[in-house]
Structure formats: C-alpha cells, structure tokens
Image (cartoon, rainbow, N blue to C red):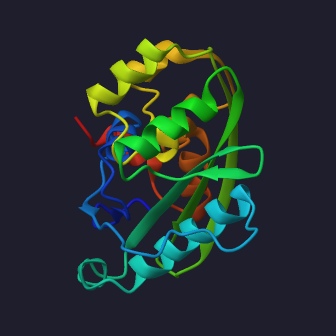
C-alpha cells in the first residue's frame, strides 16, 4: 500500500514508544492507550506474559471507537515490556518502597527485558514478535539507589528504571536490542510493519 490515507495507530500512551516510532520516521496518526489487567497469572513466565499482554492490547485497540473512526486503512502497533530476574517478574513499582526493592534486586546482577510487539493490518491479521535483551547492572551503592529514587524516574517504568535516563549510568552491559529496553524494539517493529504491508519507506519520503 502506498496510499496517503493509510493510518498508523500506536496502542500505547508511553512517551518513550512514541519517541521511538518518531525516531524511526514513523510518527503515528493516533495514540490509543489501552487499559487492560496487566497482572501476571500464577506461575506465568515473563516471556509468556509479554506475549499475552501485547496481544491483548492489540485486540483491545482493534475495537476502540477512535481506531474504528479512522476507517479500514489503518495499521496498529501494540507492545508490552516485562522485566525479569530469572523467572521473577519485576512489575512497574507503584511506590518508592517497591522501586527500592526492584533496584536492590537488580543490583550487581543480569536481568532480562522482554517486549512483545504486535502489528495488526487493515485485514485484522496479527503479526507478533517477542524480543529479549539481557542487561547487567553494576553493584548499586546506597547512594546510587537513594539518588535514583529521589529523581522519580522509576515511576511507571517496567523494572523500576529508565535506561534512556539516569539509570544508563548503572548499566555495565547490554546484550541485544537497546530500544527494546526503552520499550519498543525498532528493528523488529519496522520489520513487522513492512511484512504487514505498511508503506514504511513511502512514509519516510513524505515525512519532514
């Protein structure tokens, strides 16, 4: 498809995912945050959770009134990011105490970041990828943790940190996609959009 009427929807309210799509030259026409229950099921593996939640977000967006109002020529991108130490899922902290506990758990260890990405084309065909990145933190001092907590960057972040912010100073190594840790693996997202028929490069030529 190379029709200018083709629309792109980001089924997320995350400013980080929006910034990444814009960085890739693919600014969405609509932001449609989805509200779903993100609690993991009993004994659910981190990868499985990322897969389930991203699919659920995409399915919810397909039937959203704002999305339907765009007409049939629309593509949807949905994603969910899960941080885990082993099989232990580290949720988005809701309090400073939960954020402190997350940082203590990550200190001096390697952990994994999983992002499920789903693209839905105008025929409502779903394409999905699960991307895994391994991140190793330095051993965090008490001052490191207390200062980071005071910054407030942990709020609303999977794992309680933002690698694109101050927490980058804690990272000893990243094995895999950096943009995945930020919240949207760009290589895989663009590949899914291309495979679904979205005019990625046409959009580049027509975006200033």
- Which residue is found at the position 32% from the left and 83% from the top? 64
Q: Quadrant of the C terminus?
A: top left
Let me know if residue 179 appears in the view.
Answer: no
Q: In the rendered picture of this protein, how many numbered marks are placed on residues?
A: 0
Residue 135, percent from left and from top:
66, 27
Location of residue 78 with respect to 106 vertically, above or below: below
Q: In the picture, residue 5 is in which quadrant?
A: bottom left
- Which residue is found at the position 56% from the left and 42% from the top? 185
Location of residue 8 with respect to 148 vertically, above or below: below
Let me know if residue 99 appears in the view.
Answer: yes
Location of residue 79 with respect to 123 vertically, above or below: above
Q: In the picture, residue 154 is in which quadrant?
A: top left
Residue 6 shown left or right of residue 106 in the figure: left
- Which residue is found at the position 28% from the left and 27% from the top? 150
Location of residue 207 with respect to 167 vertically, above or below: below
Residue 47 shown left or right of residue 71 in the figure: right
Front residue of this view, candidates 184 and 161: 161
Residue 130 shown left or right of residue 86 in the figure: left
Residue 72, percent from left and from top:
36, 82
Residue 105, percent from left and from top:
62, 34
Front residue of this view, candidates 34 and 196: 34
Residue 12, percent from left and from top:
36, 60
Residue 171 shown left or right of residue 122 in the figure: right
Front residue of this view, candidates 134 and 159: 159
């Amino acid at each position: 498809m190379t029709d200018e009427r083709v629309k792109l929807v980001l089924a997320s309210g995350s400013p980080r995912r929006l910034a990444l799509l814009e960085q890739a030259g693919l600014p969405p026409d609509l932001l449609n945050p989805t509200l779903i229950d993100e609690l993991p099921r009993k004994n659910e593996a981190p990868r499985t959770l990322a897969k389930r939640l991203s699919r659920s977000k995409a399915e919810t967006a397909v039937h959203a009134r704002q999305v339907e109002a765009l007409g049939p020529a629309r593509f949807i991108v949905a994603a969910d990011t899960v941080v885990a130490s082993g099989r232990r899922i580290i949720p988005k902290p809701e309090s400073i105490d939960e954020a402190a506990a997350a940082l203590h758990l990550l200190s001096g260890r390697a952990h994994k970041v999983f992002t499920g990405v789903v693209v839905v084309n105008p025929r409502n065909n779903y394409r999905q990828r699960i991307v895994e990145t391994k991140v190793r933190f330095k051993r965090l001092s008490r001052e490191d943790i207390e200062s980071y907590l005071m910054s407030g960057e942990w709020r609303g972040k999977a794992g309680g940190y933002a690698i694109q912010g101050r927490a980058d100073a804690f990272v000893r190594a990243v094995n895999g996609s950096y943009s995945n840790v930020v919240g949207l693996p760009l290589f895989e997202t663009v590949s899914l959009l291309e495979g679904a028929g979205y005019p990625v490069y046409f959009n580049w030529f027509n975006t200033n």
